Image (tube, rainbow, N blue to C red):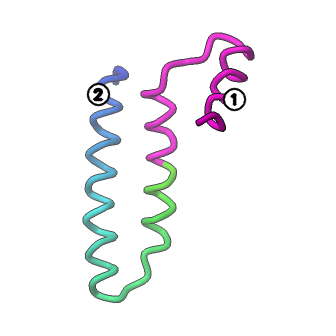
Amino acid sequence: MNRGDLIRTMQAEIQSLNEEIDLRIIKGFDYRRESRRHKFLVYNLARLIAPQESNWMDKAYKMVGTFMF
């Protein structure tokens, strides 16, 4: 499976989990397990999509930029 296929598969799984979580909330059921899976997929998807920082200096600039107005 190439990177593009993996991204599409993860997005589809996230969408499916969103629908399942919504239904469980409406019905008043526990959705803790689905929530953990959703968080895991979103985190890994963001890591796949985000560009890789080349060195520690790039990371430092991004961190400082977060707190600037």
Q: Are marks 1 and 2 in contact (CB under 8 Å)?
A: no
- Most frequent secondary structure within the magenta stretch: helix
Q: Residue shown at 63%/29% (left/top)?
A: 65
Residue named by callout 1 = 64
Amino acid bearing label 2: Asp
Viewer-closest of 1 and 40: 40
Q: Residue shown at 25%/65% (left/top)?
A: 19
Instruction: Tell me the quarter of the picture where residue 45 sits.
Output: top left
Percent position of residue 23, x then y: 26, 76
Viewer-closest of 13 and 51: 51
Mark 2, Cα crowd under 10 Å, few <14 / some 14-19 / many 20+, is few
Instruction: Tell me the quarter of the picture where residue 8 sits.
Output: top left
Percent position of residue 56, x then y: 74, 17
Amino acid bearing label 1: Val
Quadrant (top left, top right, bottom left, bottom right) of the C terminus: top right
Earlier in the chain: of badge 1 and badge 2, it is: 2
Position above or below: 52 against 63: above
Q: Residue shown at 38%/85% (left/top)?
A: 29
Percent position of residue 31, x then y: 42, 75
Please check the rendered image and state whether residue 59 is part of the magenta-colored stretch, yes or no. Answer: yes
Q: Which residues are magenta?
A: 41-69
Residue 5's disc is 2
In the visual, does 43 lie left or right of 63?
left
In the visual, does 58 lie left or right of 11?
right
The number of numbered discs placed on residues in the rendered structure image is: 2
Cα gap from disc 1 to disc 2, whole angstroms: 34 Å
Percent position of residue 21, x then y: 34, 70
